[in-house]
Image (cartoon, grey):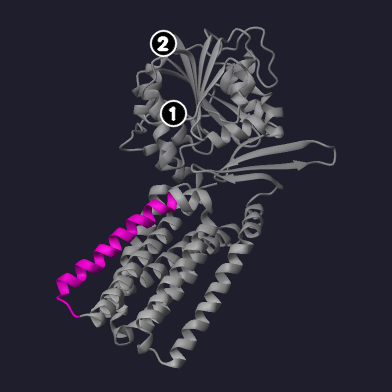
Amino acid sequence: MTRTRSARIALLATVFVCAACGLVYELALVALGSYLIGDTVGQASIVVSLMVFAMGMGALLAKPLQRRAAAAFAAVELVLALLGGLSVLLLYAAFAWLSLYTPALIAMALVLGTLIGAEIPLLMEMLQRIRRQEAGSAVADLFAADYVGALLGGLAFPFVLLPLFGQIEGALAVGMVNAVAGLGLVLTVFGTELGRRAKAVLIGSAVVVGGVLAGAYVMAEDFEVTARQALYADPVVHAERTPYQEIVLTESVTLAGTSDVRLFLNGDLQFSSVDEYRYHEAMVHPAMSGPHSRVLVLGGGDGLGLREVLRHPDVERVTLVELDPAMVDLARTEPRLTSLNRNAFADPRVAVRTEDAFTWLRGAADRYDVIIVDMPDADSTATAKLYSLEFYGLVERALAPGGRMVVQSGSPYFAPNAFWCVENTLRAAGLKTVPYEVSVPAFGEWGFHLAARGSAPALALPPGMPLRSLDPATLAAATVFPPDRRNPGDLAVSTLMDPIILRYAREEWTNY
């Protein structure tokens, strides 16, 4: 009786561990897609739906294997450990070198789901061989261990594996645990059911799987550096993956000695040091041509917009709200960035809040003369909420009487519907707007919206402020859009529940 009890505990413990590993593989695919593609909801939908479907197919395919359940389970776990452990590495390689990320993701989700689905029928047969019991009780025991294990895997992935190991090494480590758990159960509890040849094949296979995973773990850092560099034209001088995004700095130097430093967030270019002044001058100074003693900057963690704000000596206080503390730390300490932002974060007038801007605004009590909304483009579900009617309503509430706000609004040339959707949404929030565009060679034509309550704000420059890329004449011309890029007037308003701007942006940017 004691031996039977120990065998059941060992099997249920293995169910627990394997369930945790399976959920980690699933979450790893979702997280990788959100980093590389940026569409968290879309990636989650693809991965979860395909894996659940494949799990059903795997359960059916496992039916003929139940006669040799123990050996089949060990084989399934070794293959699952190998592919699950290598899944992030293989998909990253497909993205970096082959441009086949989505087909590779679909194939990986189907294969992993099939293998995970095959586990339960085999484990059910193995549980009944230890001690026969009613089907309902056996299912309850098995699924209780499975679901609790899934809870462990779901919590361990974001709070333990990602911070301690990162995505590639974390998946590899889980693959090793998966292999040990599956093979260990079969050899210790069901070893008498295996012939010598079967044992030798399984042990030999386990050695190969362990060797591949261990070798990949050792080489993971070099692989990631090489794969990352393949994504960028210029040498990568800094890269880190934070809980929010991947931050990459590149730098190239011409034969004449001109340096071009570029910042990428999740693969999207944020600025080029060669022409970033054109973007930041156009965004900041028209909004500052009025009262500007109290300024709020939402986003802009690189400090370049902050640099332009601080050029005004009569600014008394600047609050910058940036989600990712790692971005602010980099802008404070990285010599290439501090040279560009002129150590803006060291200015005593600056207060930094590392919070989600939407959440922070809901609790904000102060009012600001100028609000600068310098957010990444609305190309993901995470950023689309920052272009919503609800968000602009919160921003409007934070404006002081007579205050002005400016919103970076993407490209009116490459994504005109997304650009004009911003204007329609600002107007729906009760603001009057003035759209304008400037040329930023690294981006192309880029646009902004200046907004205020009551009447449309005058588009002007602060007197006595020398600028490299703007003067009154060029700013006046910036409000003129060609006929094929003007507001069609019938675009929907973007809201939290219907982020239409996300669809506009995706449809339009895919054409370029």
Report the front residue among 477 and 463: 463
- Foreground label between 2 and 1: 1
Q: Quadrant of residue 76?
A: bottom left
Q: Is residue 219 left or right of residue 200?
A: right
Q: Residue at x 57, y 12 (%)?
A: 460
Q: Is residue 503 above or below residue 198?
A: above
Q: Which mark is residue 455?
A: 2
Label 2, residues with CA under 10 Å away: few <14, some 14-19, many ≥20 = few
| Residue 23 locus on image (x, y percent) | 38, 60
Which residue is more in the foreground, 392 or 427? Answer: 392
Q: Which residue is mark 1?
A: 357
- For the point 51% across and 55% down, which residue is it? 167
- Residue 162 at x, y percent in the picture: 49, 51
The location of residue 1, given as percent across then percent down, is 23, 79
Which residue type carries mark 1? Answer: Ala
- Give neighbour class at mark 1: few <14, some 14-19, many 20+ (Cα, 10 Å): many
Secondary structure beneath label 2? loop
Q: Residue at x 35, y 22 (%)?
A: 429
Q: Amino acid at mark 2?
A: Ser
Sequence-wise, the earlier of marks 2 and 1 is: 1
Magenta residues span: 132-158
